[in-house]
Image (cartoon, rainbow, N blue to C red):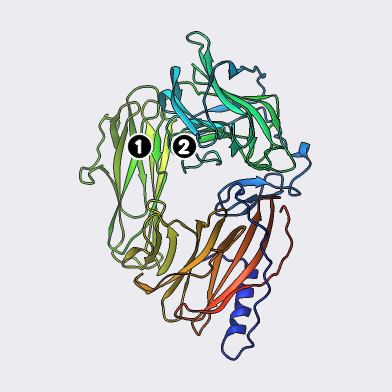
């Protein structure tokens, strides 16, 4: 198992493990900073990485709740981070493009319908559209509106406050004039969301306006008014009227995204400021033949002599009627194409001399099976990549390539959270077999998983786990010991317990190392957040377990950083 470490972390762990081994001088526990008074307000969000550089080279931060924000002292002066006009952008895979050279022509939707969004009402809909609206390969007659600066054609996770465009995690199928964590008609702020419509066929339009909503980070300083206009011809116009940013702001993004989040077109960069009195028009492409192949990449491990099968979905996303897709296969190992049942070989159905899918109706899908034969004498490390080109018969310039990778693995272990069921899971690969074990119940949702092998060939597996302790949120380090088959040797145990925390306390990114005597070093960083003044504090912590998982050295503050700051 390969695990990524910060080199300084590994060095600190090695020194600490040697120090705490029998015969060494035991260190006294360092004094930890005392937490400030509690507050019920949480910082906007954070995910897998808590710090990144934006396109200007300045540091963004992410809270454990999942939101990115630009704090004080980590960005350029206000004018320096505005979007630089690029005039045009795109196309995305479907063919959408944008232009920011169009004039602003504001439509006041406040004369229309108040959505009632605000507080616990985060989504309204479905709202009927006055015309059928084409968006990517689908056509819609209704829409859902989120208070967080976007609208969607399916009501799946439209309460999510922040995201980049495109990405496959929900919500998908969205139109986002400014997707940002926000306060709407709540907490003393009076901003609202409205919609209206107008025009006559074939030039009708539908408008959604977010009026004077507040960014959830420093809401007194961050006030936004913007709108989206859907046109009957399929074009989309974003208009930013007044975009007021303070000394720090929560991150947002602008763009459109298809129903699976795999295709989309963003405008500007995530977390940059968007300019007031600016219009951006997204143009729907002209009707064309198209093909969609998802997923575009497949991969799995196999054993010598095995016949490996993959299923590939092929969809007619064009607007030219039924299409037949020719298939061209390239592979070093023997490979062949079958119908979805994996038994019936595909043939040339249209007489052009090339194996094909058969006819696929506009908007329809078909599945094919791709099979590869692993050589009987295959050795550890042998691998193969098979490519299948899928080409439209209506327009041979329209094609996609699907890739299928297979390899005979060396033994290794991998740990992860299975997003399908939320269970912390353990995957063990060997040349002859692979197996996956659940380590926790479903819907457990740990983060930042780490694993290390022990001298007795057991594994130590650690992660961070979120919970709410009333007015504050905490992440705590948990761990378990597993044997070579993934069976539990030590039940899930809590290394850190923040039940008494009075400030948001987040233990992040456990990193593991094991000494020759079986002792386990765990290193992580602790991030404290004080929402009364938007200040935070960070320190590196370390603990030692014995080979049975018992705590030998309790959580110890190695850095003793007392500073509370904005970065």
Q: In which quadrant will I find the C terminus?
A: bottom right
- Horizontal side of 258 relative to 434 (left or right) equals right
- Farthest residue to the top: give it: 200
The label shown at residue 420 is none
Residue 2 seen in the figure: no
**Mark 1 to mark 2: distance in Å?**
20 Å
- Horizontal side of 349 relative to 534 (left or right) equals left
Residue 302 occupies quadrant: bottom left
* Looking at the image, residue 14 lies above or below residue 241: below
* Looking at the image, residue 280 lies above or below residue 311: above
Spot occupied by residue 96 in the image (x, y as percentages of width and height): 53, 28
Question: Closer to the camera, 553 or 498?
Answer: 498
**Residue on which the image places disc 1:** 314
**Residue on which the image places disc 2:** 172
Residue at (49%, 64%) from the top-left corner? 463
**Secondary structure state at the residue bearing disc 2:** loop
Q: Are marks 1 and 2 in contact (CB under 8 Å)?
A: no
* Looking at the image, residue 506 lies above or below residue 553: above
């Amino acid at each position: 198992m390969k695990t990524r470490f910060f080199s300084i972390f590994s060095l600190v762990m090695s020194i600490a493990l040697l120090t705490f081994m029998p015969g060494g001088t035991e260190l006294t526990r360092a004094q930890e900073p005392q937490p400030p008074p509690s507050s019920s307000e949480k910082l906007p969000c954070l995910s897998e990485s808590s710090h990144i550089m934006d396109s200007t080279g300045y540091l963004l931060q992410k809270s454990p709740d999942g939101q990115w924000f630009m704090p004080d002292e980590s960005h350029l002066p206000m004018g320096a981070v505005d979007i630089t006009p690029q005039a045009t952008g795109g196309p995305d895979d479907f063919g959408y493009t944008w232009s920011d050279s169009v004039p602003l022509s504001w439509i006041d939707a406040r004369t229309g319908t108040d959505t009632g969004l605000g507080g616990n009402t985060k989504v309204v809909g479905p709202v009927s559209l006055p015309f059928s609206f084409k968006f990517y390969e689908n056509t819609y007659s209704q829409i859902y509106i989120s208070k967080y600066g976007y609208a969607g054609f399916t009501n799946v996770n439209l309460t999510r406050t922040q995201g980049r465009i495109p990405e496959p995690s929900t919500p998908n199928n969205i139109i986002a004039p400014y997707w940002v964590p926000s306060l709407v008609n709540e907490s003393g702020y009076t901003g609202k969301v409205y919609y209206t419509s107008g025009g006559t066929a074939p030039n009708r339009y539908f408008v959604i306006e977010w009026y004077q909503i507040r960014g959830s980070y420093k809401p007194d300083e961050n006030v936004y008014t913007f709108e989206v206009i859907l046109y009957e011809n399929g074009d989309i116009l974003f208009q930013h009227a007044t975009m007021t940013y303070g000394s720090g702001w929560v991150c947002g993004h602008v763009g459109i995204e298809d129903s699976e989040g795999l295709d989309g077109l963003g405008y500007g960069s995530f977390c940059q400021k968007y300019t007031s009195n600016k219009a951006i028009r997204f143009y729907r492409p002209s009707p064309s033949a198209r093909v969609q192949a998802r997923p575009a990449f497949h991969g799995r491990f196999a054993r010598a002599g095995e016949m490996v099968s993959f299923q590939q979905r092929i969809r007619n996303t064009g607007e030219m009627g039924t299409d037949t897709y020719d298939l061209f296969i390239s592979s070093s190992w023997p490979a062949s194409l079958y119908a979805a049942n994996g038994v019936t070989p595909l043939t040339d159905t249209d007489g052009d001399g090339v194996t094909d899918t058969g006819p696929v109706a506009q908007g329809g899908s078909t599945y094919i099976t791709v099979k590869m034969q692993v050589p009987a004498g295959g050795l550890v490390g042998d691998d193969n990549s098979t490519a299948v080109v899928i080409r439209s018969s209506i327009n041979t310039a329209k094609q996609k390539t699907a890739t299928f990778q297979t390899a005979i693995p060396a033994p290794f272990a991998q740990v992860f959270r299975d997003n399908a069921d939320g269970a912390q899971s353990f995957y063990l690969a060997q040349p002859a077999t692979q197996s996956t074990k659940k380590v926790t119940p479903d819907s457990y949702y740990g983060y930042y998983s780490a694993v290390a092998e022990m001298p007795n060939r057991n594994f130590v597996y650690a992660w961070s786990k979120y919970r709410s302790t009333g007015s504050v949120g905490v992440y705590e380090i948990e761990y378990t010991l597993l044997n070579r088959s993934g069976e539990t040797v030590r039940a899930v145990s809590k290394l850190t317990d923040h039940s008494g925390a009075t400030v948001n306390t987040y233990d992040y990114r456990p990193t593991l190392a094991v000494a020759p005597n079986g002792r386990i070093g765990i290193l992580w960083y602790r991030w404290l957040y004080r929402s009364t003044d938007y200040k935070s504090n960070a320190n590196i912590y370390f603990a030692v377990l014995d080979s049975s998982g018992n705590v030998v050295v309790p959580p110890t503050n190695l850095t003793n950083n007392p500073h509370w700051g904005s970065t």
